[in-house]
Image (cartoon, rainbow, N blue to C red):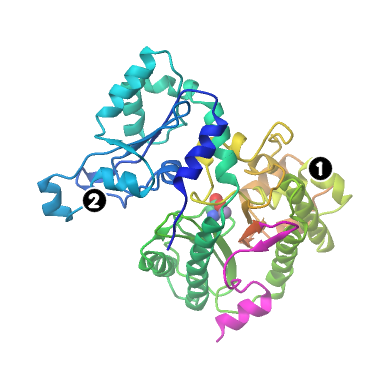
Amino acid sequence: MFRADYKKRRDALRNKIKNGLVILPGNNESPCNYPDNTYKFRQDSTFLYFFGINQPGFAGIIDTESGEDYLFGNDVTMDDIIWMGPQPSVKDMAAEVSVRNSAPLSEVKNIISAALRQGRKIHFLPQYRYDIMLWLEDLLGIRVAQLKEHVSVELIKAVVDLRSVKEPCEIEEIERACDIGYEMHTTAMRLCKPGVKEQYIAGVIDGIAASYGSMTSFATILSQNGETLHNHYHGNILEAGKLMLTDAGAETNNNYCSDFTRTVPVGGRFTSRQKDIYNIVVACHDHAIDFARPGQTWKEVHINVCKVLAQGLKDLGLMKGNIDEAVAAGAHALFMPHGLGHMMGMDVHDMEGLGQVYVGYDDETRPSEQFGLGSLRMGRRLQEGFVITDEPGCYFIPALIDKWKSENKFTDFLNYPVIEKYKDFGGIRLEDDVLITTDGSRFLGKKRIPLTVEEVENIMNE
Ligand code: GLY
Ligand code: MN
């Protein structure tokens, strides 16, 4: 049973903010195709982190000076009880999460208006839902188009500080999500046979996530055209000789995520050409885990992994020249145009909505503009308790190869005549979720999803 100390979290936030009120809106139901037909409800992660209420129509205020917290929401009506069944009162829900003050949602306006009259600072985070933006416009008198300019950087930094370091109860919950992910991926491996439609496998594994009462942590990526990094088209019939890339994870009922990728041969046996590239990506994947520890920056881990990739490709004749220079120039990004991984927690790209520059970077480690490295979502120094994905890949993207070749890009490092022969290869990505420990790192989840050539072929041919 998941149980966090929400009061302790709110007090920790209060200690990091000098003055004023913090307003944290929860999410509302979101209509799909008409008002009463809604998407599955998903609470805002930060509201959930500090207030623990997993229902629509709530908001919280944290007074950083008086020490008081407020939960706002409307008690159910008889009509609600008829359609939804009995619900606890807002006062009881507030008490459950150690909040003394509760009131109907309309009261937020009075509290915020009074604070504004007194010239108090109102801290709010960047928003991603338009109904909430309109609500804040009404509360604060700031036009929706201008809200971004008024977000509280002090609040963003405080929330990122707290949510980045996972508590033991959060790690346990992430491991539960990983265990569901294990079942999703091993099922996909068993179903991966020539003649099967991608959509069928994607639907079955999404159903596994749903069967645990949760949902997927993002829209499942499953394709025999894995060179398209985020391929959500599932209309192909699997063909022998191709590689099926599955990037999918689960979200638990308490909204913690997993995110795994495996790439397997349709039909259950790798060709020797596939094995060569696959084993390079395995080496990259394991290298990250050996290298990641508190004090190391994830950007350095990324760069070291890119060197393992480039060396492997040089050994196969696809790259040439000095590997350190090739990686510094960004030549390897032809094959891996994305970053090694991202923070993960309640959001699969944890806290991404608060701004990647605050989540993945700091004054010491700044984002890069170089192609490839510029897509690294997380670069800063690692701390014990961070949860990060380790997801190297190697892709042969025909349009990108053609473009770079026509521009004679990095001809000192890229062996285009050999690369040309791989344009029908597809793509490989391998991804696991990693906890930074006191002196190193470890994979999350009870069992590691089959990874090596032998493990993958074994499970596919059982
Ligand atoms: N697993 C999808 C992503 O990390 O973007
Ligand atoms: Mn990922």
Left or right of residue 183, residue 78 in this image: left
Q: Residue furthest bottom?
A: 462
Q: Earlier in the sequence, mark 2 or mark 1?
A: 2
Left or right for 184, reference 269 = left
Q: Nearer the viewer, residue 82 or 86?
A: 86
**Eyeballing the image, is 263 above or below 26?**
below
- The numbered mark at residue 82 is none
The residue that appears at 38% across and 16% down in the rendered structure is 116
Which is more toward the observer, 418 or 37?
Answer: 37
> Residue at coordinates 48% horizontally, 69% vertically from top-left?
184
> Mark 2 belongs to which amino acid?
Pro
Question: Which range of residues does the magenta coloring cover?
Answer: 436-462
Q: Which of pointers 2 and 1 indicates the residue nearer the eye? A: 2
Image quadrant where residue 443 sits: bottom right
The answer for how far apart the CA atoms under marks 2 and 1 are is 58 Å
Residue linked to disc 1: 328
Instruction: Using the rendered image of the protein, determine whether residue 260 is visible from the camera's viewpoint.
Output: yes
Q: Secondary structure at mark 1?
A: helix
- State the residue lying farthest toward the right: 322
Q: Is residue 28 above or below residue 37?
A: above
**Image spot of residue 284 (x, y percent):** 74, 60
Position of residue 138 in the picture relative to residue 344 (left or right): left
Residue at image location 42% in from the left, 63% down from the top: 1
Residue where numbered disc 2 is placed: 88
As shown in the figure, which amino acid type bears the numbered disc 1? Ala
What is the number of callouts on the image? 2
Residue 442 is inside the magenta segment: yes
